[in-house]
Amino acid sequence: MAIQLNNYADDYYIPLEDLDWRWTKQEVEAFRHMWNTGYSPEKIAKYLNREDPDEVIVIALCQLRKGAIEKRPGGMKGTIE
């Protein structure tokens, strides 16, 4: 079964356009603290009033690539659920 891709703009697929990509400085700082403490993406999303824990996974990927956070025990899931 083929999955219909509807998020096209000028022949380019726009992935994850339903997520909120905007993060305030305070949210990023809170995310980093909670990440380093070991909180799960679900706990971080709930604390930051994010509708989708995938938004936390996206910021984690961004911050890992920039070297602002490091891999942690428990990986993406963390140690505090």
Image (cartoon, rainbow, N blue to C red):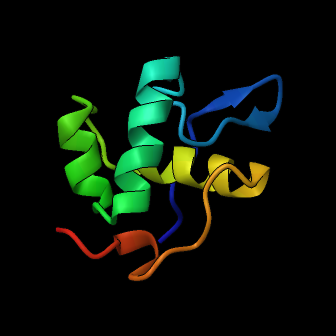
Residue 55 seen in render:
no
46 relative position to 67: left or right: left
The residue located at (53%, 27%) in the rendering is 21
Which image quarter: residue 26? top left
Which image quarter: residue 52? top left
Residue 59 location (% of width, % of height): 54, 44
Query: Quadrant of the image for the C terminus?
Result: bottom left
41 relative position to 47: left or right: right
The residue located at (49%, 32%) in the rendering is 28
Residue 74, placed above or below residue 3: below
Residue 7, placed above or below residue 9: below
Residue 52 seen in render:
yes
Residue 44 location (% of width, % of height): 28, 47
73 relative position to 39: left or right: right
Residue 39 versus residue 9: which sits nearer the camera? 39
Residue 69, placed above or below residue 81: above
Residue 57 location (% of width, % of height): 47, 54
The residue located at (68%, 31%) in the rendering is 8
Residue 20 versus residue 56: which sits nearer the camera? 56
Residue 1 location (% of width, % of height): 47, 72
The residue located at (40%, 46%) in the rendering is 33
Marker count (numbered):
0
User: Residue pushed farthest bottom?
Assistant: 74
Residue 17 versus residue 29: which sits nearer the camera? 29
Residue 20 versus residue 47: which sits nearer the camera? 47
